[in-house]
Image: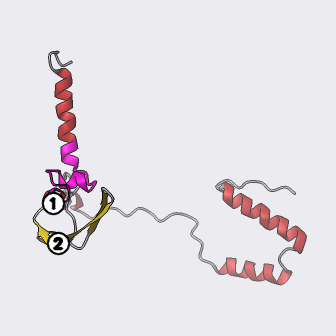
C-alpha cells in the first residue's frame, strides 16, 4: 500500500487516510453509488479557488483612527461574593468578600489585614496571609534589592 503525503497535509490527517485505506482494504471501499453521490455533492459545492481580495481602507481612515498607548496593570481587586479559604494551624479559615469589606465568622472587617490579625493575633499582610500577591510590591522589592547590590560600588 502506497500513500503519499499531500503538500499541505498534517501528520494526523495522513494517519487518518492510512487508517481509512486499511479499513477499506479489509471491509471494502465505498460503493459505486456512494462514490457517484460524493462526486455530485462536490460538483455542487461552491469552492473558493482564490482568497478574497483585501479591501482598501475608506478615504480619510487614517485621520479618523487614533492609536493610544495604554498600560494595563494587574488588579488586586476582589469581586464581592468571592470566598477566600485557607488552612491555618489546623483551622479552616473562610472569608467572604463584601462590597465594603470582608466577613469572617459573622463579623465584618474593613480589610484583609484586619482579618489576618484577628486569626493570628499579630499583624500580618492580609494579601500575603491568603496567598494573594500584589504585583506592585514585588516590583518595588526588586528595585530595592537592585539598589542594595550597587551600594558602595559605582553602577555600571
In magenta stretch: residue 56: no
Mark 2 vs mark 1: in front? 1
Element on which disc 1 rests: helix
Check the image and report above or below for 34 versus 148: below
Q: Residue furthest top?
A: 153
Q: Is residue 92 visible?
A: yes
Q: Can you tell which quarter of the image residue 92 is in?
A: bottom left
Q: Position of residue 81 (x, y in %)?
A: 24, 73
In this rendering, position of residue 133 left or right of residue 33: left
- The tag earlier along the polypeptide, 2 or 1, is 2
- Few, some or many C-alpha atoms within 10 Å of disc 1 (few <14, some 14-19, many ≥20)? some
Which residue bears the numbered disc 1? 118
Relative depth, front residue between 152 and 156: 152
- Few, some or many C-alpha atoms within 10 Å of disc 2 (few <14, some 14-19, many ≥20)? some
At horizontal 47% and vertical 65% (from top left) the residue drawn is 52
**Which residues fall within the magenta stretch?**
117-138
Q: Can you tell which quarter of the image residue 12 is in?
A: bottom right
Relative depth, front residue between 46 and 96: 96
Q: Is residue 72 visible?
A: no
Element on which disc 2 rests: strand
At horizontal 17% and vertical 25% (from top left) the residue drawn is 148
Which residue bears the numbered disc 2? 98
Amino acid at each position: 500500500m502506497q500513500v503519499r503525503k499531500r503538500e499541505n497535509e498534517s501528520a494526523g490527517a495522513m494517519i487518518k487516510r492510512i487508517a481509512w485505506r486499511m479499513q477499506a482494504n479489509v471491509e471494502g471501499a465505498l460503493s459505486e453509488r456512494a462514490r457517484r453521490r460524493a462526486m455530485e455533492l462536490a460538483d455542487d459545492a461552491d469552492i473558493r479557488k482564490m482568497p478574497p481580495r483585501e479591501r482598501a481602507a475608506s478615504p480619510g481612515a487614517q485621520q479618523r483612527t487614533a492609536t493610544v498607548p495604554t498600560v494595563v496593570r494587574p488588579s488586586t481587586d476582589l469581586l464581592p461574593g468571592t470566598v477566600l479559604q485557607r488552612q491555618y494551624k489546623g483551622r479552616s479559615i473562610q472569608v467572604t468578600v463584601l462590597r465594603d469589606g470582608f466577613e469572617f465568622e459573622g463579623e465584618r472587617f474593613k480589610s484583609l489585614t484586619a482579618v489576618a490579625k484577628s486569626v493570628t493575633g499579630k499583624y500580618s499582610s492580609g494579601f500575603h496571609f491568603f496567598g494573594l500577591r500584589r504585583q506592585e510590591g514585588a516590583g518595588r522589592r526588586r528595585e530595592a534589592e537592585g539598589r542594595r547590590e550597587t551600594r558602595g560600588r559605582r553602577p555600571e
